[in-house]
Amino acid sequence: MSAKEQGDQKTSQKNIDVNMATLRITPKTASYSMYILIAVLAVVIFAALLVALFGGTPTPKIKAPMDINKARELLYSRIKRSMNPGADPCVDFYDYVCGNFESAYPGATDIIDAMKKELFLGWADEITPDQSQQSIVDKIVMALQICQEGGAKDQNHWSDLTSYIAQFGLGVDVQGTHSRSLLDVLVQMALMHHLPVTMIVQPKLNLKDTRRLILHVSYGGPIIASWLQNPASEVLAAVEKFQGVNEGFVKDVKEVDFKVRTWVQGLSSEYPAYKTIAQMSFHTPQINASMWSERFAHYLPLTLKPNETVYVRKVEGLILTNNLVNEYRNNPKVGFHWVTAVVEYYLFAAAMKDTKEHDVKCRGYIQYMAPFALNAIYFQRHLDTTQVELGKHMYRQFRCSIRQFFKWMMPEPTAYAQDRFQLTRLVLGVPDNLNSILGLETQFHYVPQFKEPFLTSFLSALKMRAEEDLFNFQMTRYQGSMAVDRWRLLYNLEAVETEEMSSFSTFSPAFMPYSMVVFLPAMLMLPPFMDTESVAFSYAGTGRLMAQTAMHAFDKDQIEKSHEGDREPWGYGQGRGFYERLLCLERAFEKRIPNVAYGRKTLSENVPDIAALELVLAALRSDSCYVPDRQSHVEKLTEKQLFFVAYCHGFCASKQHIQDYKAGEGKGPARSDHRCNVTVSSMTEFEQAFKCSFKSPRCSFLS
């Protein structure tokens, strides 16, 4: 780094410190300070708008040209090639639809795998960002490309990493005594630098009062996950190669790692709950309420007293922090060495040449810095309003159709179940406020221009993101009704199970039970899941995915999870009808693979599957654009028949993929061919469409 760059970095750091000092106000001066904060926020947003609209360099055109007619022609030709016309649809519908899958999708294990290879890998490389980085798209794409290019270079920015973490007292040369406590460092890293290790501490949306943010305390995040998801032998071997390590450092890390992995295996969990700091401290016998309040007050722009309410999403983070702090209270050097190793292991790909899954790690870094930014750019590049509006239209049809179901319950639970579905909120690809360039500029104005080394810019961006959270936390504390729509939905999505859903490498729909959000990745609104000229096809593809995800609100693992973030017991499963329906589905799947509890272990996915098909068919029947007996785009198939073909086409997989399925090994979805055959054979419409006659009892859930 040149002397000039070092000077610029120091100046930038001073500016950041001054800004944070400005944020630290007291209730006595809140009114005056809020005017300053409001003015600052207005200037920042206005500047972002000016840059987006009239910036020195134009915003890059990120929309990729797409020939819809060619895409549709390819879609239906593949469906025809995938089908096995010699199979009897009434005997094995999956074979009829997917019997020749490998010839239609050579080299793919399933439909999603095929889409990844064709529509996802390398898409960002096709965008040429402006080097001046005047727009957020330029910044995000440049950040990704700089990180990826670093993986092919003999980069060595280890000294930048060690210099940064030294401010927390971390490093390989920590002495026997330490001037700071482990608790102090862990809270500072989580709150001020967006680098949580043993616990997440971050302002997020208050689900009971969506005008405000509340301090969330949880467990997880990419840093500890990157460490624990790999075997101890692998991470310790990596630590031994870190620059500057000695035998004592490695020995300390190995000792703590063994204990942490033991603690994690025995961590207890409970429902998320709103607790006072005093109640929260019940989980941390060695860290009392006063100690928590003092640490929070030291780094928050306002004081939180022991009677203040926080949202404890996962108590595991508190328990792990308490164990670590207590175990090494008298020998903090050992604990600091482990924290050092965990952080350096997470940032290794940003600091050194790392060819192992380097691109995946880079996307993870960008997504952690700016949640949904990559999703939004992909969304704007590949989709248009037609697909989005069709998705929203289908979901509105679901909302109307749900009123005809759950009649097997008593009147009060029926109404409650129907209302529960109305509480779900659909997110197609990205939150609505991020589906435009202007929305991206406003949401991610804190992202800096990226330059080499990537590591320095990335760490600066994380710090800026933490400052943005603290700023919004304070704003909603004193001005709860002030312009929160700018960030409300994004914070709502981040309120629970954040990073898993916003991860750009996620290609499956997700249901967020504690906020009732139904999230559908943008890729699942493209062929082979949607065709805007065929409602039958679109309901069977994208519609099925939306409905199946939403129906998780009613499976037995989710029914006590409230949209306000905590537990809400109700009498859903008290009637006979509930258990009769579960038993029917369990037996239907048990017949397919007996003696391994197959039906019971796949039940949490089979319930949403059967319920979704019921809901989709009801919504499709009421859609005025649906003409069941009309000729479809596939020769010799009516629209009604195409619906079921498209439904099962989404489950198509290679023969090897089917053979590799391990029945009875933990919970999860049923085998692909069973998800097709068992569900469609329960539908009267399927019998009518293909002139079948089934004697086995039909299963249902909604009706």
Image (tube, rainbow, N blue to C red):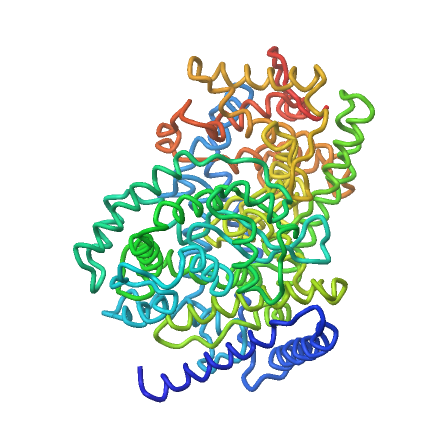
Quadrant in which residue 122 is drawn:
bottom left
Outermost bottom residue: 4
335, 696: nearer the viewer? 335
Outermost right residue: 411
Where residue 510 sits in the image (x, y, percent)? 56, 43
In the image: residue 470, left or right of residue 362: right
The answer to whether one can see residue 72 in this image is no
Examine the rendered structure and indicate whether residue 639 appears above or below residue 590: below
Examine the rendered structure and indicate whether residue 382 appears above or below residue 329: below
Residue occupying image coordinates x 73% and y 48% = 393
The answer to whether one can see residue 343 in this image is yes
Quadrant where the image shows the N terminus: bottom left
Where residue 546 sits in the image (x, y, percent)? 63, 42
Where residue 21 sits in the image (x, y, percent)? 56, 76
Quadrant in which residue 389 is drawn:
bottom right
Residue occupying image coordinates x 45% and y 63% = 366
Residue occupying image coordinates x 48% and y 63% = 369
Examine the rendered structure and indicate whether residue 83 appears above or below residue 277: above
Examine the rendered structure and indicate whether residue 455 appears above or below residue 593: below
Outermost top residue: 695
Quadrant in which residue 107 is drawn:
top left
